Image (cartoon, rainbow, N blue to C red):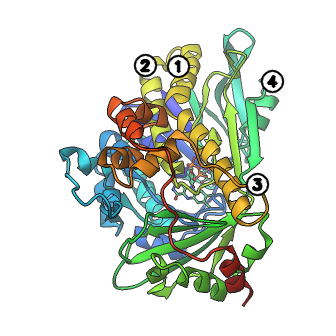
Amino acid sequence: MGSVVVCGGGVVGLAAAMMLARDGHEVTVLEADADRAPAAPAEAWEDWRRAGITQFRQPHNLFSRVREVCDGELPGMTGRLLDAGCVWVDPLATRPPALADWQPSPDDERFRFVTGRRPVVEAVFAAAAEATPGVTVRRGVRTAALRTGPAALDGVPHVTGVRTDDGAELTADLVVDATGRRSRSADWLSAAGARPPAPESQDSGFAYYTRYYTGPERPQRRAPGLTPMGSISVLTLDGDNDTWSVTLFGRTRDAPIKALRGSVAFERVMAACPRHAHWLDGRPITDVLVMAGVVDRYRSPVVDGTPVVTGLLTVGDAWACTNPSAGRGISLGMVHAQVLRRAVAAHLDRPAELAASFAAATEAEVEPFYRGQLAADRVRLAEMAAAGGDGPPVELRSPVVALLGAGMTDQVAFRAFVELLTCLATPQDVLSRPEVVAALDRHDGSPPPSAPGPDRARLLELLAT
Ligand SMILES: Cc1cc2nc3c(=O)[nH]c(=O)nc-3n(C[C@H](O)[C@H](O)[C@H](O)COP(=O)(O)OP(=O)(O)OC[C@H]3O[C@@H](n4cnc5c(N)ncnc54)[C@H](O)[C@@H]3O)c2cc1C
């Protein structure tokens, strides 16, 4: 068994630490933010300061894949989330009305997931990590640099620990970078003499406007959680402890929608969406929270077929992050932590093999979701631009769009789409199944009908009033 330092104590860093400790490793988590989570997770919404995570109070959803990974790797976590007031959601329950002869399948249980507001979820993970033998969480400790030792691979620096910002040094058999979307590991690597990881980076181009509400009853779903509506999209998410969030988002470049930052315009637009207006039937617990400038970023740990470093593996947002409209970051981070656990179990004592096998498994099991999301976002941005009169019409033709269209009337296609949405399977897996191919063959490829809501002219009126 070995010693592991995990830099970053967000949900993914904590999950990775717990998984590695369950295999007998001694794991130290270094978290830059000093504040501990409140003892009662539900209080984290009000009381937990987390400057290190800018999206801490932005809307978050935990899909089925989070539950699947937790139940397999971190037994008891789903129960802890429920004890903290998180809630069950069944994505199959909001199936299209045309699927009237719905036949339940014994496998449907795996689609259900448990979700809650991000601070509450993270407080649950923090409490579980504190209670896990073999995990030590040190808060208020920022990783500043990497320590290196004799190379395990010719010409490639080998990391043997970290230096913190107060000058302390920690040695470890493995360092994990889980410092999130603002990771400084490229600087750390260049200071250690490594080639920089091959980076890709671009502003996703979306701006999000969110308000949280509370009330005695969670709103019933009359539309999917994420509903495209011309130049904007509507996102409605269930929260813990009788809370929920409502988000409207559009293109950052769409100047008129900036009016959504005012609560009156925000609620006026929501009220004009017939299947979503009832999500306003509660007491607001926040103003409209705004987030823009969210960067899509990917850092390949392998350049020209060779790992840029050994002894350091990167997980979660520090490896790749996209705009959050599909709400999958934590799901993918959990899959990534699972991939890490497997690679470490097989190769910890052979750093070059560990780096190569982790990179290969990441590429096979996590990267397809990242690539799929980028492609979907580009299409959605173009579609929003066209609906806003700022771009040419977009013909929505892709296998995933066709699957969604087919799912309006076909159970196999609907289940397959939900599987994809909730990250239970990659697009490649889903689209290659014979029964899904057959369902797509029966469909003409057209997208689903648009949801009712204000057209562009009406939207502009609502925003301007
Ligand atoms: C607006 C928005 C909405 C989102 N909605 C969803 C959603 O609905 N569902 C979903 O699954 N995902 C969502 N995401 C994505 C999700 O927030 C991330 O995928 C997730 O937080 C990644 O977890 P992480 O542990 O990798 O990184 P983070 O959560 O960012 O944690 C990184 C941690 O590292 C610490 N740190 C940073 N630098 C250092 C250092 N040098 N030393 C020590 N510690 C350091 C930070 O303080 C932080 O605690 C959303 C993201 C955004 C921007």
Instruction: State how far apart marks 3 and 1 are (Cα).
Output: 44 Å
Circles 4 and 2 in contact, beta carbons < 8 Å: no
Closer to the chain start, of discs 1 and 2, is 2
Q: Is mark 4 within 8 Å of ligand 1?
A: no
Tell me the CA gap for discs 4 and 3.
47 Å
Residue to which mark 4 is pinned: 193
Query: Quarter of the image holding residue 281?
Result: bottom left
User: Which amino acid type is shown beneath numbered disc 1?
Assistant: Ser
Of residues 66 and 52, which is closer to you in this image? 66
Dot 4 or dot 3: first in sequence order is: 4
Comparing marks 2 and 3, which lies closer to the viewer? 3
Residue type, mark 4 in image? Gly
Q: Which residue is mark 1?
A: 357
Q: Quick one: SS at disc 3?
A: loop
Q: Are marks 1 and 2 in contact (CB under 8 Å)?
A: yes
**Whole-percent x, y for residue 120 in the image:** 45, 66
The answer to whether one can see residue 136 in this image is no
Kindly state the secondary structure of the residue where label 1 is placed. helix
Dot 2 corresponds to which residue? 346
The residue nearer to you, when weighing 441 against 24, is: 441
| Side of 172 relative to 81 (left or right) | right
Residue under label 3: 392
Amino acid type of disc 3? Answer: Pro
